[in-house]
Image (tube, coloured by chain):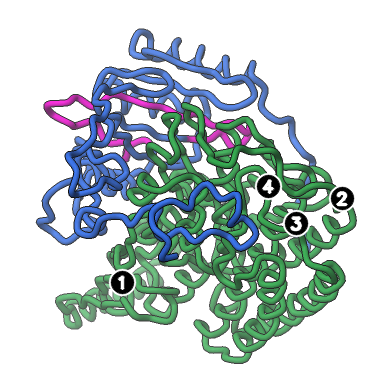
Chain colours: A green, B blue
Amino acid sequence: MTSTIDHLDDRQKLSYIAAQAADARLNVELETEGMTLNIGPQHPATHGTLRIICRLDGEQVVWAEPSAGYMHRGYEKLTEVRSFPQVTALVNRIDWLGSFANEVPFILAAEKLMGVEAPPRAQVIRTILFELSRIANVGLFLGDLGVQLGAVTPVFMAFRDREHVLNLIEGATGGRFHPNFDRIGGLYKDLPAGWIAETRLAMKRLRRFCDEMDELLFGNEIFQARLRGIGVIPADVAKQYGLSGANLRASGVDWDLRRDQQLPLSYDKIDWKVWTHPDGDSYARCWVRLQETREATLIVDRLLDILPSGPIMAKVPRIIKVPEGEAWVSTENPLGEMGYYVVSKNDLGPFRCKIRSASFNNVSIVPWVLRGVYVPDVIAILASLYFILGDIDR
Amino acid sequence: MSDATTTETPALPGDGLREGVVDRMRDALGSSLIDSLVKPGDDVWVRVATDAWREAGRVLRDVVGCEYFCFLSAIDWMPSPYGKGEDDPTQPPPERKTDIVQGYAGGETRMQVFARVTNTDLHFGVTIKADVPDENPVVDSWIPNYAGANWHERECHEMFGIGFTGHPDLRNMYLPTGFEGYPLRKDFPLLARMVKPWPGIADVEPLPDESSEGDATAEGGES
């Protein structure tokens, strides 16, 4: 305490001490028992049913505890009684906004154990659909972000333009939300006629949507004031908690599983960019997501340029038996690192399948990051961390 | 916007790097590192003694440089006594294997905890396992090493009944308080399959163009 007032003269010191004393008296007079504020389980900022219990002191959160588990579906147990091809139907319900992306790491893990690789055309189409799920997922985030901060217009624009992406996914796979399209050894069907031209058109629209969001939200002073410097997560804390995806890159960690590991996906065949931000605050997280959405549209465009012809299915037996072994495959899903640790015992289905979902780790940092923030910032921080409940509970 | 960085694709991990991980862990842990497996071009597995579980995590973080915590969970190696829950309830249950066979990097107990951590600078990950004693399934908590292990250990405690010494709060995350049994253990039956037998092959409709050669069209013609 003395160090802060050392440079003051006596008069200033006295008034400083008096002010401190008055403050302390006021605090004692106003001291309440603390309030417990319950956010959720049904709250628009939670993308599902997450309940957050906050203990408040005045306007400040002194303790916060998310209470998940309202949507636990036990997929890890269910995979043990399913065959390998059946598992994709389960897992694409984990992150329901980018569902195709959930299937890919599981299929890659099974392919790794079997020693099968999808033909080049299937790999490129897989990567395209993977990025389309990212746009469908993160595009909605950008719109939803506005709602949570009090701006209603962006969400309508997000739903309007996301529709183009969902139409593309439906056109290629037959399912808007749960494609169940990925197969061990390739894909179920080839792309329909006219899909490529449609996709190019849609990507142009999506880039315009990103520009609109950039101007409407990110250039907005209120938006910046609500997010800048709020909920700062330093890089070492982010790594300790296993934050991934845009949350990690917004803390300045240059780590992207699309680039930093060898997988039979087509990211190494084209030129693209990993976006990071050094600040680690809520604004940085949202900004990185915006850039990633725009980058994803470019990735799709460039992959369409190099789309080879050829078969879309490798030779796999009709009844799929996966040899004994263990494999870990994770990919950079819209929400972050999603991976499957598959243990096979030379059987029709997995012996054990550990599902590592991004939101589980991303939400486990909430007690740390909410400590000491003010109540209005709670929603802004939760919105910027961006989680989907199916992805927490699995 | 000057916040962006360029992407120079860094060198991808080689097997030499993975061998180096095992050597450095052996130097730091001595005989507590029981077994290891390096699959060329794939991944590295190590198994440490139960007592050295927390120390191994610290070594991974400080010596090997794996600062990024990916996940922590457990495996029950006992084959399920219920198979896939597809038995015909009118028939006596079929004979099943009961021998416990552990996976990569071996093991001696029925259950193992395993975790994965990643070095984000050198771009490699390590999967680490440790045996969990059969009669008293408790290991040390990893929270001092990685704060993110908190929720993973809660989940693991709830699903496998493994205790974590030093964990502040092993409450249930998903199940109601007082739930009996540990759902992800193999001897916990999948109740949905017990209550209503799996219809199995009978409801598989033959695809239109495959109906002639179909090999899955047994069991009655109601489809």
Q: Distance between the residues labelled 4 and 2?
A: 14 Å
Of mark 1 and mark 4, the one earlier in the sequence is 1
* Residue B2: image location, x then y, percent: 78, 60
Q: Quadrant of residue B13?
A: top right
Q: What residue type is labelled 3?
A: Ala
Inspect the magenta stretch and tell me whether residue B156 lies in it: no
Q: What residue type is labelled 4?
A: Gly
Of mark 2 and mark 1, the one earlier in the sequence is 1
Of mark 4 and mark 2, the one earlier in the sequence is 4
Label of residue A51 in the image? 1
Magenta region: which residues? B117-145
Say which of A36 and B116 sits in front.
Answer: B116
Residue in the image at 78% along x and 46% along y:
B7
* Residue B83: image location, x then y, percent: 29, 39
Q: What residue type is labelled 2?
A: Ser
Residue A58 sits above or below residue B141 on the image: below
* Residue A263: image location, x then y, percent: 67, 39
Q: What element carries label 3?
A: loop
Marks 4 and 3: CB-CB under 8 Å?
Answer: no
A360 on left or right of B49:
right
Q: Of the residues tagged 3 and 1, which is closer to the observer?
A: 1
* Residue A189: image location, x then y, percent: 71, 58
Residue at the disc numbered 4: A186
Residue at the disc numbered 3: B4
Residue in the image at 11% along x and 51% along y:
B180
Q: In which quarter of the image is residue A285?
A: bottom right
Q: How far apart are marks 3 and 1 (CA)?
A: 35 Å
Q: Of the residues tagged 2 and 1, which is closer to the observer?
A: 2
Res A334 visible:
no
Label of residue A309 in the image? 2
